[in-house]
Image (cartoon, rainbow, N blue to C red):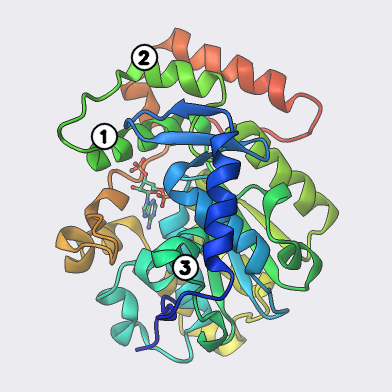
Amino acid sequence: MEKNAESSQAPTPGEEDLSKEIEELVLNLPTEKNWDGSYLYQYQGFWCPSRHIHGTISFQRRFQAQDTDIILTSFPKSGTTWLKALTFTIVNRFRYELKDSPLLTTSPHDLLPVNQIQHSTHNQTPTLEEFPTPRIFATHIPYASLPVSIVNSNCRIVYICRNPLDQFISNWHFLLELREQTKEPISLDEAFEMICNGIQAFGPIWDHVLGYWKASAEKPHKILFLKYEDLKVGINFYVKKLADFLGCPFSKEEESRNVIEEISKFCSFDNMKKLEVNKNGRLNDGIKTKVFFRKGLVGDHTNYLNSSMSERLDKILEEKLGGSGFTFKKP
Ligand code: A3P
């Protein structure tokens, strides 16, 4: 099985210089402690996690997009895992029958790793040319900070967003799971205060979403903008839409064989969550795979946030998004 995750063994020429330059640059960036005790750096207007900063800059400077590439983009905890599973399955449906899918034994995150993390691994530049076509990459970097070749080439971008209240609760649980057990977790109230100020990995969330929203309005053939909540209520429609957008539409014959419905079911939360690899596995970088499958619901924030908290964030979002024409889905 081919994986989208190989990296070259020898450091790339110039990599040491880049590391030094990045170390110096990071010293001068504003910084905040993230909820899990790790650090965030304010880089190009967004809060970049310390473990992503080197990879982000290396990705920006080195990545050469090809016209056939597919770039999956998202704000963390907004449905990235689902989008990866769907895209991989749709695009590779003639290579792998569902019963032989690599997703049965490999996490979507190992099949399609986040690109800036790949660029960080061992200070090496991944040998991306060897990936099968179409190459599928994933990143959380905001639109304005994407590598120039992604914006200028004819590659396609798919973006998924999610209601920030649910995204917050999802992220809160995720970081609690990942934190070093020795570190005292930040309280929900403290974390909430931070997101109200836009401080979380790749935040502010409103800037992230608006960047992709505006770009998709300008270039609808290049950027497909999706909402987690829409997928939850009409996944078959979006599987079809995704396939059309990616240039691999379903034939009438496939439709009559219910291929769309089968892909939807295969990539569903219930099906993915129960696979051994997603229950008891670990990613190549050691993270437990089960942390990517919690509840998969719309509106779970109502179980954690009181109405004054929800109203406060809703009001901030209204102000930040005002006049853009964009609104988040509410449960
Ligand atoms: P919850 O924590 O609310 O359950 P990301 O993939 O961007 O990290 O987002 C993770 C969120 O997506 C988690 O939300 C997770 O449960 C949910 N999720 C993962 N796979 C999913 C799927 N196939 N369908 C729907 N939701 C899914």
- The answer to whether mark 1 and mark 2 are in CB contact below 8 A is no
Q: Amino acid at mark 2?
A: Asp
- Return the disc, 1 or 3, that comes first in the chain's sequence: 3
Is 21 on the left or on the right of 76, as rendered?
right
> Which of these two is toward me, 66 or 122?
122
Q: CA distance from mark 1 to mark 3?
A: 27 Å
- The answer to whether mark 1 and mark 3 are in CB contact below 8 A is no
In the rendering, at what x and y percent does residue 6 appear? 41, 79
Residue placed at 71% from the left, 72% from the top? 155
From this viewpoint, which residue is outermost toward the right? 218
Would you name the residue on which mark 3 appears?
A: 86
Badge nearest the viewer, 1 or 3: 1
Residue placed at 30% from the left, 18% from the top? 187
Element type where label 1 sits in the image: helix
- Return the disc, 1 or 2, that comes first in the chain's sequence: 1
Q: Amino acid at mark 3?
A: Leu
User: Can residue 77 be spotted in the picture?
Assistant: no
Q: CA distance from mark 1 to mark 2?
A: 14 Å
Quarter occupied by residue 56: bottom right
Badge nearest the viewer, 3 or 2: 2
Is 213 on the left or on the right of 261, as rendered?
right
User: Can residue 232 be spotted in the picture?
Assistant: yes
Would you name the residue on which mark 1 appears?
A: 176
Q: Amino acid at mark 1?
A: Leu
In the image, residue 135 sits, relative to residue 59, either above or below, namely below
Element type where label 3 sits in the image: helix
Q: Residues within 10 Å of mark 1 (few under 14, many from 20)?
A: some
Would you name the residue on which mark 2 appears?
A: 189
